[in-house]
């Protein structure tokens, strides 16, 4: 998993689950089959007039699996369904309806999207697949406790686990991008939003949770020169051990790197462009030319690093790194807390405002130019100042809960988005209590709801038409199922 410490916030990716990405599926009305599709379907129809049966081991003749559906020219195995069931249950996802019917249907729906994505030349790069697979593996390791326990649970080596996830992740991404492409041009007008909610029963109007606007001032406790020198000496020692052949860079990274995202991969970061990395880190990494020579010690916003080149490909680079963070003393933290508490007392005396202090005292680069106002990415590419309480950093939310609008908190410590311990105070600028949505106050929220409804309707129509024009066969035991979509049993 590439280091979240080094990636820009917009590049953080979410974890994937097959089940989560094959819901809310759909397509454009009408017969959308291309000549390629028709040829594929005709071939499938000629070669699979009946559903294939058991899958046998060619050497022993033992039944190892069972083909239960065919969609186009793609088979769905009983093992595919069982794997999806186990994954959804492990992640606490609810399976609506009869799982024996709904799960193979969900797999079939994903195959419709993947097939269309291939026809439309949508691509997922190997670098993206590798990154996604590592994210999933790291997530599992964090849940189960160790790589060894994961191998024991999955009854596979790490190499086998990566291989088994490769195609799942690729298909997952193809299906997701196909859905996004299908609905990318759908828009809703203000008039449509107003009409939609004018006709909605009052008890069906969505509830908007409590939202707050928060201003923050942070001060980073100073690290002593002795502590910085200690960390640099450690990194010099690592370099000497690698250069002498005593050990490998990867081994040291696994044991000592304080970047949790890359340490498990021997410090390796996948191919990244210069803009995806911390500027100081990138300046050194992109000047490396010899994979046998380690970089000088690099100081970034996250700590100190040594870097090893793995490969260059166009304007992207693959490197390994070891991150070490100087430790902040409790004395320095106490000094930071005392300084901010004194600052708040001065505000109470009217010597200056919170906004003035945020501008001239705070060392938070993301907020100090905006009077300390924190910004929230709403997940739809928009940045706004309002947060739901659960979207705030834990320490900030805990402080805000004790405040009335306009009040300033006592000083506290927190870990910022760069992994550093900082001292902070916050001011509650505004609080909007939870309420039923109103068109005048919550237009954007209501617009998002209507837009999502339009997209869902469009996707459902796409799926219905796609099913009608796709070769589908299933074992007789599935033909009495109550499926989410009609039309699977067409002739």
Image (cartoon, rainbow, N blue to C red):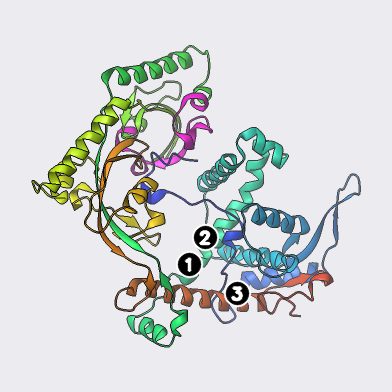
Quick check: 119 left or right of 473?
A: left
Q: Residues within 10 Å of mark 1 (few under 14, many from 20)?
A: few
Q: Position of residue 475 (x, y in %)?
A: 82, 69
Q: Position of residue 395 (x, y in %)?
A: 36, 45
Q: Earlier in the sequence, mark 3 or mark 2?
A: 2
Kindly report which numbered mark, 1 or 2, lies closer to the viewer in this rendering.
1
Say which quarter of the image contains residue 237: top left
* Residue in the picture at 52% in, 53% down: 124
* Residue in the picture at 80% in, 68% down: 48
Quick check: 17 left or right of 183?
A: right
How many numbered circles does the render carry? 3
Q: Residues within 10 Å of mark 2 (few under 14, many from 20)?
A: some
Q: Can residue 209 be seen in the rendering of this structure?
A: yes
Image quarter of the C terminus: bottom right
Which residue, given by chain and number where applicable, does mark 2 sit on?
Answer: 122
Quick check: 444 left or right of 68?
A: left
Which residue, given by chain and number where applicable, does mark 3 sit on?
Answer: 463
Which residue, given by chain and number where applicable, does mark 1 sit on?
Answer: 181
- 275 vs 158, nearest the viewer: 158
Q: Is residue 275 magenta?
A: yes
Kindly report which numbered mark, 3 or 2, lies closer to the viewer in this rendering.
3
The stretch in magenta equals 253-281
Q: Position of residue 354 (x, y in %)?
A: 17, 49
Query: Which residue in the rendered view is the most extreme toward the right?
Result: 61
Q: Can residue 469 be seen in the rendering of this structure?
A: no
């Amino acid at each position: 998993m590439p280091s979240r410490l080094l990636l820009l916030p917009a590049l953080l990716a979410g974890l994937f689950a097959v089940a989560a990405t094959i819901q809310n599926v759909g397509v454009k009305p009408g017969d959308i089959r291309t000549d390629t599709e028709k040829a594929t379907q005709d071939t499938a129809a000629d070669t699979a007039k009946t559903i294939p049966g058991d899958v046998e081991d060619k050497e022993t003749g033992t039944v190892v699996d069972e083909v239960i559906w065919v969609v186009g020219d793609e088979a769905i195995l009983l093992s595919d369904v069982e794997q999806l069931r186990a994954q959804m249950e492990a992640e606490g996802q609810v399976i609506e309806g009869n799982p024996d019917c709904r799960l193979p249907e969900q797999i079939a729906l994903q195959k419709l999207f993947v097939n269309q994505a291939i026809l439309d030349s949508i691509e997922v790069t190997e670098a993206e697949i590798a990154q996604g697979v590592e994210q999933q593996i790291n997530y599992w390791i964090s849940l189960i406790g160790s790589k060894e326990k994961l191998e024991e649970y999955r009854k596979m080596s790490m190499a086998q686990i990566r291989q088994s996830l490769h195609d799942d992740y690729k298909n997952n991404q193809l299906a997701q991008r196909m859905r996004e492409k299908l609905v990318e041009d759908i828009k809703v007008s203000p008039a449509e939003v107003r009409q939609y909610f004018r006709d909605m029963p009052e008890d069906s109007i969505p509830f908007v949770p409590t939202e707050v606007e928060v201003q923050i001032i942070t001060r980073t406790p100073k690290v002593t020169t002795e502590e910085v020198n200690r960390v640099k000496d450690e990194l010099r020692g690592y370099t000497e051990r690698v250069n002498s052949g005593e050990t490998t860079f990867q081994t040291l990274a696994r044991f000592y790197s304080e970047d949790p995202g890359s340490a498990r991969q021997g410090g390796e970061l996948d191919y990244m462009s210069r803009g995806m990395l911390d500027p100081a880190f990138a300046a050194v990494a992109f000047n490396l030319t010899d994979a046998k020579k380690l970089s000088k010690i690099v100081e970034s916003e996250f700590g100190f690093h040594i870097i090893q080149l793995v490969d260059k490909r166009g304007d992207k680079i693959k490197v390994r790194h070891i991150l070490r963070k100087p430790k902040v003393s409790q004395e320095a933290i106490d000094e930071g807390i005392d300084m901010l508490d004194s600052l708040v007392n001065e505000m109470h005396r009217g010597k200056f405002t919170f906004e003035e202090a945020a501008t001239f005292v705070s060392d938070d680069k993301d907020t100090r130019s905006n009077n300390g106002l924190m910004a929230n990415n709403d997940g739809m590419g928009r940045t706004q100042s309002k947060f739901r309480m659960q979207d705030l950093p834990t320490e900030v939310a805990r402080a805000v809960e004790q405040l009335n609008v306009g009040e300033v908190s006592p000083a506290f410590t927190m870990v910022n988005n760069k992994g550093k311990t900082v001292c902070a105070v916050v001011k509650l600028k505004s609080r909007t209590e939870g309420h039923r949505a109103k068109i005048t106050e919550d237009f954007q929220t209501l617009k998002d709801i209507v837009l999502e409804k339009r997209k869902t309707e469009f996707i459902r129509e796409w799926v219905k038409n796609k099913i009608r024009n796709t070769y589908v066969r299933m074992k007789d035991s599935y033909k009495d199922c109550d499926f989410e979509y009609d039309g699977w049993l067409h002739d």
